Structures are given as structure tokens and as C-alpha cells.
Image (cartoon, grey):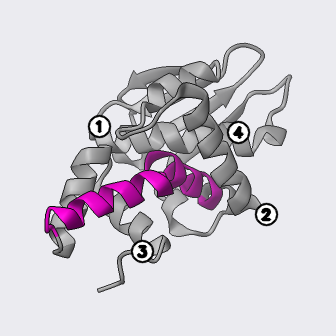
Amino acid sequence: MVENRMIAEAEGLLEKLGVESAPIPVDRMAESLGIRIVYKPYEDGDDVSGMLYRGNGQPVIGVNSAHHIHRQRFTIAHEIGHFLLHEGKMYVDTPTVRFRDSVSGLAIDDEEIEANGFAAELLLPRKFLERSLDGLFKRKVRDRKGIVEKLSSEYKVSSQTVEFRLKNLGVLLPE
């Protein structure tokens, strides 16, 4: 099952680099996989967050430098997901380019859904979240907004990413 593979791949990367707390060093993870990261503003503005380029040489993740740092981190994790989960899509003679754009988040393309799921697993690992939530409850942070803001700050991801992740884990009920 793809979900189990997403979890296993994310946990494997965390273990490989000895990452035990947030924020997750996605740039180091890309480097450990032999992927170079290039930051540049895209001419298409907000429509393109990033891309994964695989050719005959070193793979490259392109990141839209005009985006917020939290968005950039999610983009890197998303593209690492494509790299690990969709490796069969690479053509040796012809480079494969996967764009992360406004369609990616619409839940209509299986590979985009899988890459988003992988990014969530990598940036907000279940076992890390359990510790963080336990700590928040011990400090009596119990309101939804406070929890989301604290986790967003701790994990260096957007509030929206935190909310989606907590909802998908059944931790935060929909409003």
C-alpha cells in the first residue's frame, strides 16, 4: 500500500540522518539523497512552487524563492516524495519534470496526492507530533488556534499544513 510506503520512506530518512526533533532539516535530507536544491523566483509567480528535474546527472529540486520559507520547506519535502515514490517515472534519455502547482493540492492526481502525503509524514512525523501535543497539553495549551500556531512555529510549516495533518491523523476534529 502506498500509504505504508510513504510512512516507511519518511521514517527511514529521519532515522538515516538521526533526526529526533523538529524542525525537520529537509535540505539536508535532499543532500543525503544526492539531490541539489536551487532557489529562484519563478516567472509564473505563485502558480509554480517547485519542480523535480531528473536527467543524466544529479537530480535537482527547484524551489520558488518568492514563496514563504514554510512553503519552500513543504515544496522540498513534496519533491523528495516524488523522487522516492515515483522513481519509475524517470526517463534516462529524456529528463522528467514534475511541477508543484495549483492543481497539486486539488486531490485529483494520484502522484500529487502521494507526494503531499509523504511531505506531511516527513515534516510532521506522527511520533514527533505525539510528543509535541503531550507537551502542549501539559502546558495547558488547549485551544485549537493556540495548538496550531505552536506546532506551526515548532515544525516550521504553515498553519494550514498543521491543520490538515492533525485532521488526517484524527487528532484535530473539523470545525
> Looking at the image, which is closer to me, 17 or 58?
17
> Looking at the image, which is closer to me, 157 or 55?
157
Please report whichever mark, 4 or 3, sits nearer to the chain's N-terminal start. 4
Q: CA distance from mark 3 to mark 1?
A: 23 Å
Seen at 52% across and 29% down, the residue is: 18
Q: Position of residue 12 (x, y in %)?
A: 65, 39
Q: Position of residue 163 (x, y in %)?
A: 34, 67
Seen at 46% across and 77% down, the residue is: 170
Using the image, tell me which numbered label, if any, was put on residue 1: 2
Residue 96 visible in rendering: yes
Q: Amino acid at mark 2?
A: Met
* Residue 130 inside the magenta-drawn segment: yes
Please report whichever mark, 4 or 1, sits nearer to the chain's N-terminal start. 1
Q: Which segment did they paint magenta?
A: 113-141
Residue 67 visible in rendering: no
Q: CA distance from mark 2 to mark 3?
A: 21 Å
Query: Which residue does the numbered mark 1 point to in the structure image?
Result: 69
Q: CA distance from mark 4 to mark 2?
A: 15 Å
Q: How many marks?
A: 4
Query: Which residue does the numbered mark 4 point to in the structure image?
Result: 84
Query: Which residue does the numbered mark 3 point to in the structure image?
Result: 167
Please report whichever mark, 2 or 1, sits nearer to the chain's N-terminal start. 2
Label 2 close to label 1 by CB (< 8 Å): no
Label 2 close to label 3 by CB (< 8 Å): no
Element under label 4?
helix
Q: Residues within 10 Å of mark 4 (few under 14, many from 20)?
A: some
The C terminus lies in quadrant: bottom left
Please report whichever mark, 2 or 3, sits nearer to the chain's N-terminal start. 2
Q: Residue furthest bottom?
A: 175
* Residue 131 inside the magenta-drawn segment: yes
